[in-house]
Image (cartoon, rainbow, N blue to C red):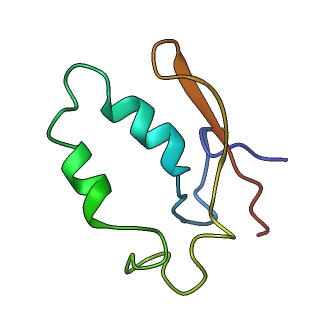
Amino acid sequence: MRYATAPGKIVATSQLALPEEACAAVYATPGYEQSVQNLARIALTSDMVFGNDGGIHQLATMSGSASGGYTASLTVAV
């Protein structure tokens, strides 16, 4: 397994989607008040990047919390 943060030559580029619940929790914290408007305007199913499949193949698994920090995990075949 190779981590996206590992040093060395980049072998692939991708994007990952974050679950709406995690986004909503972050946007409810001080400093993100204006970002919550973006979340209300778009869904994964209508997003220009993730809309083809609703983000099902790019949806990260999240652990942690908005107050303590999140870790996102996504297995990507290369």
Quadrant of residue 56 within the rendered picture:
bottom right
Rendered position, 10 above or below 48 = above
Furthest-top residue in this view: 68
- In the image, what residue occupies the spot 31% across and 54% down? 39
Residue 16 horizontal side relative to residue 66, left or right: right
Residue 66 horizontal/vertical position (percent): 47, 22
Rendered position, 11 above or below 71 = below
Residue 18 horizontal/vertical position (percent): 53, 50
- In the image, what residue occupies the spot 56% across and 50% down? 19
Of residue 16 and residue 28, the one placed in the foreground of this image is: 28
Residue 21 horizontal side relative to residue 30, left or right: right
Rendered position, 48 above or below 21 = below
Furthest-right residue in this view: 1
Image quadrant where one finds the C terminus: bottom right
- In the image, what residue occupies the spot 57% across and 76% down? 54
- In the image, what residue occupies the spot 77% across and 46% down? 2
Residue 58 horizontal/vertical position (percent): 63, 64
Quadrant of residue 3 within the rendered picture:
top right
